Amino acid sequence: MTTLVFFGCTFIAFGPAIALFLFTIARDPLRVIFLIAGAFFWLVSLLLSSLVWFIAVQISNKDSASQQKGLLIFGVVLSVLLQETFRFGYYKLLKKANEGLLALSQEDTMPISMRQLAYVSGLGFGFMSGAFSVVNILADSLGPGIVGIHGDSQHYFISSAFMTLAIILLHMFWGVVFFEACEKQRWLSLAVVVTSHLLVSCLTFLNPQYEGSLIPAYLIVFLMGTWAFSSAGGSLRNLKLCLTCKDKDFLLANHRPR
Amino acid sequence: MHCWKSTGPWSWFVITLLPCRGSDKCPLCRRVVIAVNIPLMNTSESEEDSYNERSALVQAESPTMPPYSQDTELPRPVEAEAVRRRPTADPGASDRPDRAEAERESTAESEDEEVTLKYGAKHVIMLFVPVTLCMVVVVATIKSVSFYTEKTGQQLIYTPFTEDTTSVGQRLLNSVLNTIIMISVIVVMTLFLVVLYKYRCYKFIHGWLILSSLMLLFWFSFMYLGEVFKTYNVAMDYPTLVIIIWNFGAVGMVCIHWKGPLQLQQAYLIVISALMALVFIKYLPEWSAWVILGAISVYDLVAVLCPKGPLRMLVETAQERNEPIFPALIYSSAMIWMVGMAKLPTAAEPADQDTDDEGQISDRSDLERSQGAPEGQVVTGREQVFVPGEDQEEDRGVKLGLGDFIFYSVLVGKAAATGEDWNTTLACFVAILIGLCLTLLLLAIFKKALPALPISITFGLIFYFSTDNLVRPFMDSLAAHQFYI
């Protein structure tokens, strides 16, 4: 059971993300660098929010469970807000860097487009977020133990894996929409992204009632996915062309000289 | 400039990155530089302008230049009146083959820079991959083989003060004293080597290095194998073990000190860095290890940047003498740039960056001395990995000193060793990679000798302590309630 659960949950949680990484990012060193930088930014945001939470816990009453839970909820909300702030900060940094690079390299085109950066940074955030959420759980799933022996849910591991998958995909979609909104100065879209992030995190407060948290989360994944797809320039027509391998631009762009 | 090299023969105990000013004989890489006019791209041949590292991370997309791909049939020969001279290498020279390389003249140096710009990001990745591999090996060993995390009380003679004291203050004091002793040993070793080099005792140094690598490849790997077998309860007989160790060690010596396939050499270097890091993790006491990590990055910073630092002196001596660099302990991902070649050999293309860690030599010597054996610094031939010498145009590769590998792995390994938490390990890993990236960025901006340890180790330390103390309780509480942020 244990190894099976471990591998199953790992692939559920990280499968799509690793596939995305391998097929779209691994070949291009610049994208890998920006992915890792995105992960770093997420890490810093987590650090700050943990710091604030930790200080709050130290000055609070440690015996009152409800207070601790309240502080945790406060920590979650703060963390979400800080993550989005750091995403904005990363956007600003990338914009400046790109302008600098453009000026220096005497080229007309940017080496990496803003949309690619949005995707890559979103995935970076997602990787780190997913990893921090689930790696310890996966490590525990390898060892001996009984799930939910004290009356907790039996589906702890698998629901964690699915939730992690949702979060990773969401971060990627949020990244795309966020950067697009920043580029086009659409602050409403920005607000919607932040709100949806808050919504997803707050839905997890309903755990272990997984129907309440997982299903809406996946609904939001689907919605954000279509939004990100359309804001990145996709449309039904594009999708049809791509799936039937008739998209000439794509074919030409990927033509490799022999 | 046509290469980035370490600072002279002492690259193995200094992390320095030094751009080579093209002259008729480059003092660092010993290449005969011939001016050649090769219009590579359609960008104008501007005068030599300094480029910013940020651009080095850019893959400059020149319309006439095909996208960089695995094959290197670049269309340069079309417009190039490229007169690329064959390197008049002397393969007989033991570990220091002199290779000539065609150098673009200064008007074409901007093109050189463009090309370097284009591949700058690739160099960063070429360092990321081996560093990651080394860390993965160390973390995997730490998590599975309990030998390296057991504290037996046995310590190196360079850290004589025990940390088994009652009061916190005493423990802190002991660790600081341990650090002072360790760092002073390192400084003494460095100076000793400077002196040896100054008085041209090359044979002594060679012998020292060979002995050192012998010890690493045979003894440490034997110990490691033994522990792995114990952990997995594998029954092994001595004759088989002797054959395995003998083959491993002999091939390693050949690959590292003489010639061998590039990837095999890289693999060996990664393995010996990992072994070294594991030994450090085992034998350095807890607090001393952290203080030593901090102190060695400070030392590195000081020694490389201060005018009177030993490493600087070495650079200057080497440059004065115009001598080739000793085979040093450097990880090389050397690539070949073939012009007009139909096929690419196993490696890829050129770029030069050398980062070497200075602390490494003394550390390893210290360690080995503690084992009672005479010391030597393992030295690897810098660019001897390519067998088909005739077809090499340039042999530029990204190089990183093994000391860097070792200390990065020590940091991540210690993060993995303390407790069941994987978040700390992940955080340190990302922090170190970002530090390495920033170091390379700074290198390209400042274009002078730079230490490679400080930024990464600083980030790593900050993230280790903050993740361990702040983030871990937060994430644990979140996981307990299954909240997601």
Image: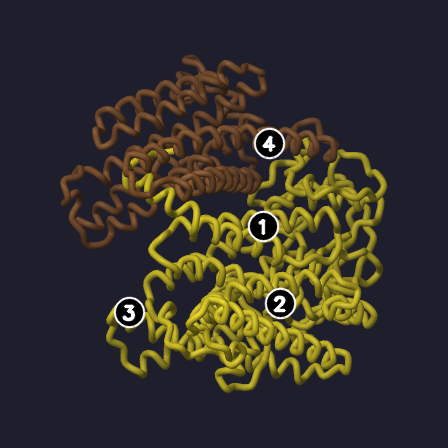
Chain colours: A brown, B yellow
Residue depth check, mark 1 versus mark 4: number of the one nearer the observer: 1
What x and y, as percent, mark residue B326?
68, 72
Circle nearer the viewer, 3 or 2: 3
Per the image, the residue denoted by label 1 is B435
Q: Label 2: which residue?
A: B384
Q: Give the amino acid at mark 2.
A: Gln
Check disc 1 and give the amino acid type: Gly
Label 4 to label 3: alpha-carbon separation: 47 Å
Mark 2 vs mark 1: in front: 1
Q: Earlier in the sequence, mark 2 or mark 1?
A: 2
Task: Indicate which disc residue B231 carries.
Answer: 3
Q: Is residue B256 left or right of residue B483?
A: right
Q: Is residue B18 left or right of residue A144?
A: right
Residue at image coords 43%, 53%: B425
SS of the residue at dot 3? helix
Q: Is residue B404 above or below residue B203?
A: above
Q: Nearer the viewer, residue B476 or B109?
A: B476
Subunit bearing disc 3 = B
Quadrant in the picture for residue B182: bottom right
Secondary structure at numbered mark 2:
loop
Q: CB under 8 Å between callouts 3 and 2?
A: no
Q: Position of residue B205 (x, y in %)?
A: 66, 81
Label 4 residue SS:
loop
Left or right of B174, for residue B415? left
